[in-house]
Image (cartoon, helix red, strand yellow):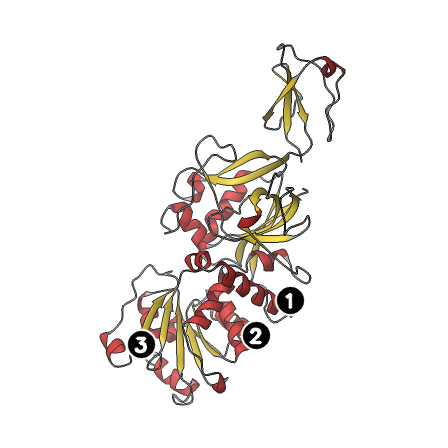
Amino acid sequence: MFSRCVARSAVGSTPFQTSVVKSRIISHHLSSVTTTRQCWGPISNPWVDGRRYISVYGYTQAKALVYSRYGEPQDVLQLHKHSISAPNGSQVNLRLLAAPMNPADINQIQGVYPSKPTFQTTIGTQDPSAIGGNEGAFEVIATGPGVQGLAQGDWVIMKRTGQGTWRTHAQLDESQLIKIENKEGLTPLQVSTVSVNPVTAYRMMKDFCDWDWLRTGEEWLIQNGANSGVGRAAIQLGREWGIKTLNVVRERKTPEETEALKQELKDLGATAVVTEAELLSRDFRNMVHELTRQGKEPIRLALNCVGGKNATALAKALAPGSHMVTYGAMSKQPVALPSGLLIFKNLVFDGFWVSRWGDKNPQLKQNTISDVLELTRAGKFKDIPVDEIKWSWNTEAPELIAAVQETLTGYRSGKGLLTFEGDD
């Protein structure tokens, strides 16, 4: 797509006729005058106020979901249309492949997330605005003359958070991007969702527990939110690394749906799956005792994204000297810990925020992503369920905004995923 511009005579305001072409402007009137260009939004009528709007080669029409103030997505998000020029220097022009909608993205729009976006007018918004989304996969469609490591057709993801991914096209500096070195055997879904949930699970399991690899298959991890993106990643990494997993999920609407979910996670590699009601029951201690062969197989690590009584129950299941890592707070309840767990079991409690970790460790983040994608390419890391929202050039703003708003509501069939269906 191309932006439309108006060509004006520098020596007079009288409009003149031109022909619309992609690569150049052709007009016999231009031979005797100097012209200047001013870019405008697209119009259906080529003549507006006596001025002729023409396509100019090198400009790309783009749309972005933006917000200029904090609030609920349905109240503050807008679909902004703008033009992107040809890249200069080390700039890279990108086309969206897919971008997930994570709960943290919604929290950021609401203004309650610790990481705050930069509000600016670089894409021509009337008020300083931020672009929604932090995770996504893009394809390179053009590069500036100073670009060294990227070429047209390459796939990339964002190096840091806050760069804005809910947009059809983008222009960023090469230094802001991570190249997917080998995209063969990968899908946009897999690449677009690799940098948050799988990386979170990978780093928590690697960095917060000193596993005894000589006891492969004899140590456990316990986690709540097991049906989440992080939970599913932890299950599959545990299967690959010989770590057994005890997984907690919320009950579904019917017992049949709950059992189906349990089986789905077991098919991914979960060792055992229990409901939250079972976790909080008096029988849970006996269940753990039986699963761990009377405690001979210690539960060394707990991953908590819920909080409240659920998190307390996870901590009670841990073996002495173990870790619990909190990376979310879905229940919005504090983590309450009996003093005895600290005094007599010498448990260690940590927090993990993948955004901050990734910004501080860009190379390690890139290495972790490569490891996960290699597992994916080998068929050892399955796709997460998604609720796909197809984004074409004609998709209306209300449809996109409603999809974003639904991210934090109820039971969804899968993670919301924006997939762009358009040309360069």
Q: Are marks 3 and 2 in contact (CB under 8 Å)?
A: no
Q: Amino acid at mark 2?
A: Asp
Q: Quadrant of residue 48?
A: top right
Counting from the top left corner in percent of width and height, residue 74 is at: 44, 42
Circle 3 crowding by C-alpha within 10 Å: few under 14, some 14–19, many from 20: many
Q: Secondary structure at mark 3?
A: loop
Numbered circle sitting on residue 267 = 2
In the displayed structure, does residue 73 sit left or right of residue 87? left
Quadrant occupied by the N terminus: top right
Circle 2 crowding by C-alpha within 10 Å: few under 14, some 14–19, many from 20: few
- In the image, 151 versus 98, the foreground residue is 151
Q: Quadrant of residue 326?
A: bottom left
Q: Amino acid at mark 1?
A: Arg
- In the image, 315 versus 72, the foreground residue is 315
Using the image, determine if residue 121 lies above or below residue 266.
above
Circle 1 crowding by C-alpha within 10 Å: few under 14, some 14–19, many from 20: some
Q: Secondary structure at mark 1?
A: helix
Q: CA distance from mark 2 to mark 1?
A: 19 Å
Q: CA distance from mark 3 to mark 2?
A: 31 Å
Q: Amino acid at mark 3?
A: Leu
Label 1 vs 3, first from the N-terminus: 3
Residue position marked by numbered label 3 in the rendering: 347
Between tags 2 and 1, which lies in front? 1
Counting from the top left corner in percent of width and height, residue 358 is at: 46, 58
Using the image, determine if residue 49 lies above or below residue 88.
above
Residue position marked by numbered label 1 in the rendering: 377
Any part of residue 213 in sight: yes
Counting from the top left corner in percent of width and height, residue 274 is at: 43, 75
Q: Residue at x 59, y 69 (%)?
A: 381
